[in-house]
Image (cartoon, helix red, strand yellow):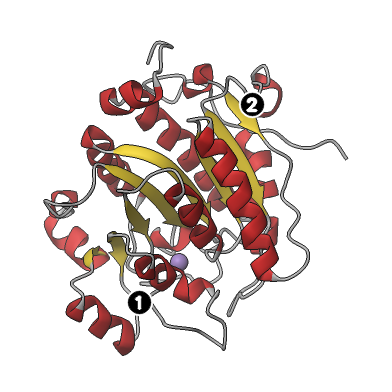
Amino acid sequence: MRSLSFHGDDVVPSSPDTALFHILPVPLEETVSYGGGTADGPRAILEASRQLELFDGRSVPADCGIYTAEAMDCSGTIDESLERLARRVSGVAARRAVPVTLGGEHSLTAACVSAIKEHHRDFGVIQFDAHADLRHAYEGSKNSHASVMRRIWEMGLPIYQIGTRSYCLEEHHLRQKEEIAHVNAEIIWRQGTAAAVLPGDFPEKVYITFDADCFDVSLMAATGTPVPGGLLWHQVMALLENIFCDRICLGFDLVELAPQPGMHGATFTMAQLAYVIMGYLVRSDINRDFYDITASPG
Ligand SMILES: [Mn+2]
């Protein structure tokens, strides 16, 4: 079976040496607690990416080079998979390219972030998610998708949560006690996207993790734990635009898509999200400086 690449045959495949973006397909599905299917996420996103226009409306991010790596082997224990992923992300960061990890379940973000930490001391993590994912452990696993942000918080990294609307009392208390910065979905709906303001001391460099369930269930039913009251497309676009004004993005992941028959709209949404995030990055002056991007932003 021929391996899939982002955008398929529309673009000349970039070599890993020159591509700005390295797509890492990670079909990880180990600790899923409700609906399954995240293992099919990366493949479905890559297939849907063939339907994308190269022009994203403002730029042609593909001109900066997109390299798609082989899908990662997720056999063995989850610890082994996370270690394998960390090595891969670290390799991309070492080239000063942008790791774009396509999941797979949310647990994988801990590996991405720990790998980035090998290369950058001062950065924060911006999390788009319906859930806080701050549980100490869930269903006996510290590597659960429901604990991933707790692991990252324990690494000593600042976190900013966007679109949250489902969390337990333990998580609620931890957020209050430790002043974990966030803007809940309800606040965005009532006050608009301008309500999402990163704390004044939030680092200039950020890693972005995007859980599909941040989107409203009407747009994104194809995910393990869908929740009503979430964000819509243009709210997410406005939020991303703000972030890329003054933040350097060290990498990002899209997780928790669980493709369902007949719901290709949800899958295409995640493919387009990956591409528009690349677009925000290649048009952002602070990122162009950081990555030494010379291609025209379009
Ligand atoms: Mn999550």
Numbered disc total: 2
Query: What residue sits 33% from the left and 54% below the top?
Result: 126
Q: Element at badge 2?
A: loop
Amino acid type for the residue under numbered disc 2: Pro
Q: Which mark is residue 101?
A: none
Evaluate whether residue 74 shows in this view.
Answer: yes
How many residues crowd mark 2 within 10 Å: few (<14), some (14–19), many (20+)?
some
Which quarter of the rendered picture does the C terminus lie within?
Answer: top left
Task: Look at the picture and state if 258 lies above or below 139.
Answer: above
Asked whether mark 1 lies closer than 8 Å to ligand 1, one says no
Q: Quadrant of residue 247?
A: top left
Q: Element at badge 1?
A: loop
How many residues crowd mark 1 within 10 Å: few (<14), some (14–19), many (20+)?
some
Mark 1 and mark 2 residues within 8 Å of each other at the beta carbon = no
161 or 292, which lies in front? 292
Residue occupied by mark 2 = 16
Query: What residue sits 58% from the left and 53% below the top?
Result: 86
The reply, left or right, for residue 183 in relation to residue 269 is: left
Percent x, y of residue 184: 24, 66
Task: Look at the picture and state if 25 lies above or below 231.
Answer: above
The reply, left or right, for residue 49 in relation to residue 151 is: right
Task: Look at the picture and state if 181 lies above or below 290.
Answer: below
162 or 123, which lies in front? 123
Evaluate whether residue 259 shows in this view.
Answer: no
Q: Which mark is residue 166?
A: 1
The reply, left or right, for residue 90 in relation to residue 273 is: right
Q: Quadrant of residue 37?
A: bottom right
